[in-house]
Amino acid sequence: MLQNKIQEVFNEPGCSKNQSKSDKERKKGCTKALQPGGAAGGCAFDGAKIALQPITDVAHLVHGPIACEGNSWDNRGSKSSASQLYRTGFTTDINELDVVYGGEKHLFKSIKEIIDKYDPPAVFVYQTCVPAMIGDDIEAVCKAASQKFAKPIIPVDSPGFVGAKNLGNKLAGEALLDYVIGTEEPEYSTPYDINIIGEYNLSGELWQVKPLLDHLGIRVACCISGDAKYHDVAQSHRARANMMVCSKSMINIARKMEERYQIPFFEGSFYGISDTTESLREITRLLIQQGAPAELHDRTEALIVREEARAWQRIAEYTHRLRGKRVLLFTGGVKSWSVVSALQEGGMEVVGTSVKKSTREDKEKIKELMGQDAHMIDDMTPREMYKMFQEARADVLLSGGRSQFAALKNKMPWVDINQERHHAYNGYEGMVNLVKQIDLALYNPMWTLLRKPAPWDMREVRA
């Protein structure tokens, strides 16, 4: 059953990268299967967990050794406006006896304990490598527990060894499609209802966009999965339009919701002023196409004019200090092109952007923004990155925490742009925040002090 699901994901017609391959290449899938135990931090389980954990009011139970939950627990800065249950780590912590005799009874007891203590609206159960190899049937356990406790118990069959993180994102989407989306009906719906797919509300980024939509009367019926509630996800099939944010990590959700419920979707970004504007216009266009009043267009244009003017006015105080500064962007996915647009709007030059986790469409958008000769980096070792800073080919590094040391060892500024960050960069307000943080990093007086020779080195020079 799992193999069939994986093959279905690999044949996803909404993924143009797979559709451009031959039948033989498509059967191989888009990722090489990983070895059990050697996939920590980038495996399918990890991808499924980070995709679904921002659903805030459900219990996320990891069926496997405690190290799997330890690796994935709370590793993103996804914020919640209500329940904090999603930040509690639950694991069956299977041991050697479970491996010998099977862990299904252990799993059932763990589900019962969670329901008795926390009474969540649903429990998500994640399959990991060890129970998958010993043959634990989590679908059967979840079905029995659902009948016993009269609650949705959702199996997420994504053991780490089946592939990499992006595959796990899609398997998480399949779990929502199979067991959650369309299982409940909302009390009411409006012509202005949308879903945002692939947005995880990192550092509260969704909340920087939501006021714009609220001003237009557009209701976010569900965000999958940032700051989401279980019942919202279950009722999300009644929205009028979908916006997909995260580099097609959940393209299967958007495409199948269009197929099953006739909900049109588009891929957009809220990073940068121009991208935010285009996304607002596209949301408006789809809603009007789906029956919303045509006057929504005029209200959207009025909002755009006001917010763009306000953002540019606030950015102006930084642009003369940042103009011409060279930025190395070392991230992936949608940020590989959407942040490029934001940086260029701030007057900076992007000397290179990583594309290791980017799709073909992402790369085409990079070429549109940076030209056909854009420096796209499939992978860069710390040594190469260090050399790049030594040769002064970049003034600041924007990356995740694992890449920061190449810049810091070279006494160069670094700004966190990845999932662990503490600042939100979405929307017009987010663009101002991004420019401000880069300015603070570049002009922090500590860099001048760090670059000065040490006092003992100065004595040697004078001698």
Image (cartoon, grey):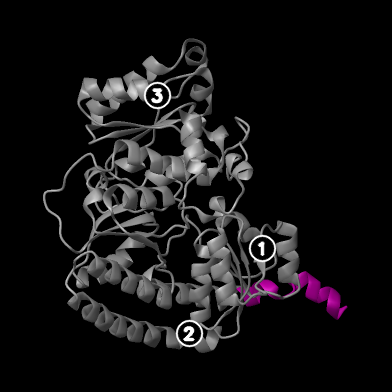
Instruction: State the residue in front, 215 or 110.
Output: 215
Q: Distance between the residues labelled 1 and 2?
A: 28 Å
Report x, y in % for residue 47.
48, 43
The N terminus sits in image quarter:
top left
Dot 1 corresponds to which residue?
Answer: 377
Mark 1 touches mark 2? (CB < 8 Å): no
**Residue at x 35%, y 59% (from the top left corner):** 265
In the shown orientation, is residue 194 left or right of residue 354? left
460 in the magenta segment: yes
Res 37 label: none
Instruction: State the residue in front, 52 or 7.
Output: 7
Mark 3 touches mark 1? (CB < 8 Å): no
Res 138 label: 3
Occupied quadrant, residue 405 = bottom right
Q: Distance between the residues labelled 3 and 2?
A: 54 Å
> Magenta-highlighted stretch: main secondary structure?
helix
Dot 2 corresponds to which residue?
Answer: 318
Report x, y in % for residue 20.
58, 54
Report x, y in % for residue 448.
64, 77
SS class, disc 1: strand
**Residue at x 47%, y 39% (from the top left corner):** 8
In the image, farthest residue toward the front: 23
- Mark 1 is surrounded, within 10 Å at the Cα level, by few (under 14), some (14 to 19) or many (20 or more) other residues, namely some
- Mark 2 is surrounded, within 10 Å at the Cα level, by few (under 14), some (14 to 19) or many (20 or more) other residues, namely some
In the shown orientation, is residue 345 left or right of residue 430? right
114 in the magenta segment: no
Inspect the image, locate mark 2, and give the three-letter code of the amino acid beneath it.
Tyr
Q: Which of marks 3 and 1 is nearer the N terminus?
A: 3
In the shown orientation, is residue 13 left or right of residue 331? left
Q: Give the range drawn in magenta.
A: 447-463
**Residue at x 68%, y 57% (from the top left corner):** 379
Q: Can residue 135 be seen in this view?
A: yes
